[in-house]
Image (tube, rainbow, N blue to C red):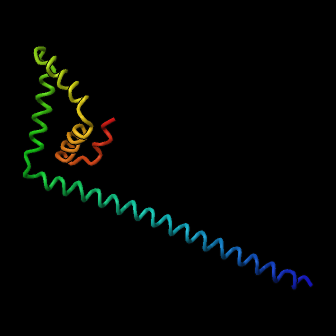
Amino acid sequence: MLQSLFGPVAAVATKFMEGRQKKAELKARVEEAKVNAKIKKLEQDGGWEEKAMDASADSWKDEAWTICFIAIICGSFIPAAQPYMQQGFDFLRTAPEWIQWGILASIGASFGLKSIGKLKG
């Protein structure tokens, strides 16, 4: 009598354990797929930056932006230029948003920075 009772219980327990094992295997596969996707994205991102650096090897944009920033910094220390610089920055603050984003995109492309959009707040 005990055997007739334990047989079905053992079968149910076996099915339950097999189900848990399959669920754990699927969960591990999902986690592995997530990790592989992150690795692939990182590899693609690195490829983009490498391509951007290669493309800018013969470009004058980096130098132009660097000269521009040096002029802005130097002009900030010249008292006669400070009011004009302040007016320029005030004007840029009121410029259409697409101009502001265009400037950021141009700087980002020049220096190979994909995350420059995070700087605009």
Q: Which quadrant would residue 65 be assigned to in this image?
A: top left
In front: 2, or 64?
Answer: 64
Residue at image coords 71%, 74%: 16
Residue 72 place in picture, x, y as percent? 14, 27
Residue 14 pos. (x, y %): 72, 78
On the rendered image, what quadrant is the C terminus found in?
Answer: top left
Residue shown at 12% from the left, 37% from the top: 66
| Residue 106: quarter of image | top left
In the picture, measured across the screen, residue 42 lies left or right of residue 62, that is right
Give the residue drawn at x 63%, y 73%. 21
Closest to the observer: 90 or 108? Answer: 90
Q: Is residue 110 left or right of residue 28?
A: left
Q: Is residue 106 above or below residue 52?
A: above
Residue 63 place in picture, x, y as percent: 9, 41
Image location of residue 110, percent across then percent down: 16, 46
Quadrant for the N terminus, please.
Answer: bottom right
Q: Which of the 4 image quarters holds residue 42? A: bottom left
Whether residue 99 is situated above or below residue 20 in the rendered picture: above
Please identify the residue farthest to the top as the structure is shown.
79
How many labels, in total? 0
Tell whether 70 sits left or right of 22. left
